[in-house]
Amino acid sequence: MILRKGFALLRRMRLALRSAAMRAYFRTAYPGISCAASARFGPRARLRAFAGGSIEIGAGCFIHDDVLMIADGGALRLEAGTHVGRGSVIACKEGITIGAGSQVAEQVTIRDHDHNWQGDAPLAEQGFATAPIAIGHDVWLAAKVTVTKGVTIAARSVVGANSVVTRSLETRGAYAGAPARLLGAPTDQGNP
């Protein structure tokens, strides 16, 4: 029992030290990145802000291993208490906000842009179409969800595994499918 508590304490201390080192690195390497002192990071989390982009990580956020967050000219904001699961990708060229207490499971993709595709010009030269994404507070995006540009997801909604969100989900509820559609809304039985 004492040994188990000792190992748990060592793990928490190692996470705190690693997170402090990563926050210092992000601040030094990318001036557009700001992290609350209580934000924690897995050892292989990668944050990049360039071309005037910014990333703001709120208090109590936890960014797991192998997460990639890129702000290429856009503003990416995670509010307090948001968790981003292992292997997720969040790429921002205009604006992405994820509300407080939201849970992003593993291998979720959130991108506020996609490639233009018109005429005979090479694809690499055609640029991007962008539109901001707003994810409300206390939202759960299950494993392997994809969220596309221009989407708003209502607060306290749940999006099922492997779903593709291509249009706004403006009513609190449970969604699933490709494209995601409303499966049901909660009944208010004393829940705010």
Image (tube, rainbow, N blue to C red):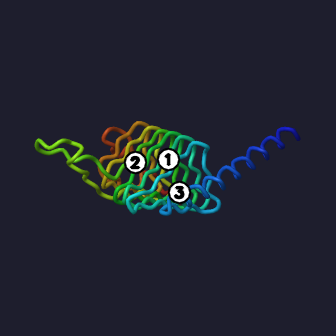
Placement of 150 over or under 86, stated as above or below: below
- Visible in this render: residue 170? no
What amino acid does circle 3 point to?
Ala
Q: Nearer the viewer, residue 112 or 189?
A: 112
Residue highlighted by disc 3:
29
Residue 131, x across and y down, in percent: 29, 57
Q: Nearer the viewer, residue 190 or 142?
A: 142
> Label 1 near label 2: C-beta < 8 Å?
yes
Placement of 166 over or under 74, stated as above or below: above
Residue farthest to the left? 119
Residue farthest to the front? 29
Front label number (3 vs 2): 3
Q: If you read the primary sequence from the N terminus, does the residue marked by circle 3 or circle 1 appear first?
A: 3
Q: Residue at x 74, y 44 (%)?
A: 11
Residue highlighted by disc 1:
104
Element under disc 2: strand
Left or right of residue 124: residue 189: right
Element under disc 3: helix
| Distance Cα–Cα, label 3 vs label 2 | 24 Å
What amino acid does circle 2 point to?
Ile
Residue farthest to the right? 2
Q: Which corner quadrant of the image does residue 72 belong to?
A: bottom left
Residue highlighted by disc 2:
110
Left or right of residue 20: residue 86: left
> Label 1 near label 3: C-beta < 8 Å?
no
Q: Residue at x 66, y 56 (%)?
A: 20
Element under disc 1: strand
Callout 1 crowding tier (Cα within 10 Å): few <14, some 14–19, many ≥20? many
Residue 47, x across and y down, in percent: 50, 51
Q: If you read the primary sequence from the N terminus, does the residue marked by circle 3 or circle 2 appear first?
A: 3
Left or right of residue 18: residue 9: right
